[in-house]
Amino acid sequence: MKIKSMVCAPGRTGFFFDDQRAIKSGARPDGACYIGQPVTDGFSAVRQAGESISILLQLEDGQVAYGDCAAVQYSGAGGRDPLFLASQFIPVLEREVAPLLAGREADSFRDLAGLLDGLHTADGQRLHTALRYGLSQAVLDAVARSHGELMCQTVAREYGLHSDWSPIPIFTQSGDNRYENADKMILKGADVLPHALINSVESKLGRQGEKLLEYVAWLRERILALRTAPEYQPVLHIDVYGTIGLAFGMDQDRMADYLARLARAAAPFRLRIEGPMDMEERTAQMEALAALTARVDAMGIPVELVADEWCNTLEDVRYFADNRAGHMIQIKTPDLGSVHNTVEAVLYCKSHSVGAYQGGTCNETERSAQVCVHAAMAARPDQILAKPGMGVDEGFMIVYNEMSRIQALLRN
């Protein structure tokens, strides 16, 4: 089946773009806003509304396949592509991509996604990761429609995967409302929680880590109090945005001792700590995280470290996995560009005995979240992020329900 034409529609995401460098430099929260000046190129404020672009592919039989271009909350930080604004990139899509897709057969997801992922514009620049992300979602949908199958079946067929279509653990994120939202997660039976957004030493971690310790102890007691069955044993996964390294001066002995204290506070629940340090550079980040991972293992500390910052692309995922820089790697879907890179990253982690967390960002859309569920159901990561948004209910509903629909359809 041929693609007749491509239409673009500007949209909103489920959260915001935040200037991470400005926040780390002291921008103060004020309600839903931040007080301070932006420091990252492209930002007009420390926090601004998230933007997306819907890619609508009109097929020759009248069907419309679609996907959404979106970028992470902390765009422009950690080696990522710059801020993604719809008004700047719709003209690029209309000029560079629409003519390329018009009249093309929607016969192979991997071929079409690979073509778009490697596309360079007339000025020699590679397409922004957000564009490659949304375009690949749309062509995956187009190919699935052409073959009369679900998107997850297209991925499984093209990669030679044999999925059992069983549910994948869902990881919910709380944002700053880490107490009330934790209650929501427990009541809804989230498999992994709460993310917690520990992105400040002073206000959230504590100078000696005391504030996060107190929160982990509270979370443990809250799960025990609210759960309705003893078999509910969620994994505690907390993103600390490098603040442990900042608080303890990058001293790995002190960091390991603190991780051991966190693990004791979390018991009997498994604990994952994402981004314990941020070395502000890819090689240094890999080496520091690999060293801390080895130290945690040697000391027998029951905590899993999760790579995030400076591990953005498929090549980065391979690099961190090859060097065991973390027990688990977040595969941050918008940062990898095309969805086929996400699938390959998950499969690479699994083949190297490294945990695969198919993540993303609160700053996506319902469509990108749905397509990511299909990719995950075929590739089988260890956990998938509930997205978009930070309110728990909406993101969990979107991911859970799409997974349930897939299972119901494939049982028939």
Image (cartoon, rainbow, N blue to C red):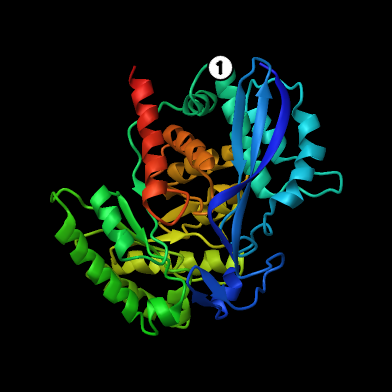
Rendered-image quadrant of the N terminus = top right
Image: 409 above or below 10: above
Q: Which element carries disc 1, helix, strand or loop? A: helix
Image: 146 above or below 170: above
The residue positioned 13% from the left and 49% from the top of the image is 229
Which residue is nearer to you in this view: 30 or 349?
Answer: 30
Most extreme residue toward the right is 123
The residue positioned 28% from the left and 66% from the top of the image is 300
Rendered-image quadrant of the C terminus = top left
Using residue 88 as the reference point, say whether residue 163 is left or right of it.
Answer: left
Residue wearing tag 1: 147
Which residue is nearer to you in this view: 307 or 72?
Answer: 72
**Residue 58: x, y in percent?**
67, 24
Which residue is nearer to you in this view: 87 or 404?
Answer: 87
Q: Amino acid at mark 1?
A: His
User: Quadrant of residue 350 in the image?
Assistant: top left
Using residue 143 as the reference point, say whether residue 5 is left or right of it.
Answer: right
**Residue 190: x, y in percent?**
30, 49
The residue positioned 57% from the left and 69% from the top of the image is 20
Q: Is residue 367 visible?
A: yes
Using residue 335 as the reference point, say whether residue 199 is left or right of it.
Answer: left
Q: How many marks?
A: 1
**Residue 9: x, y in percent?**
67, 40
Using residue 375 as the reference point, say whether residue 397 is left or right of it.
Answer: left
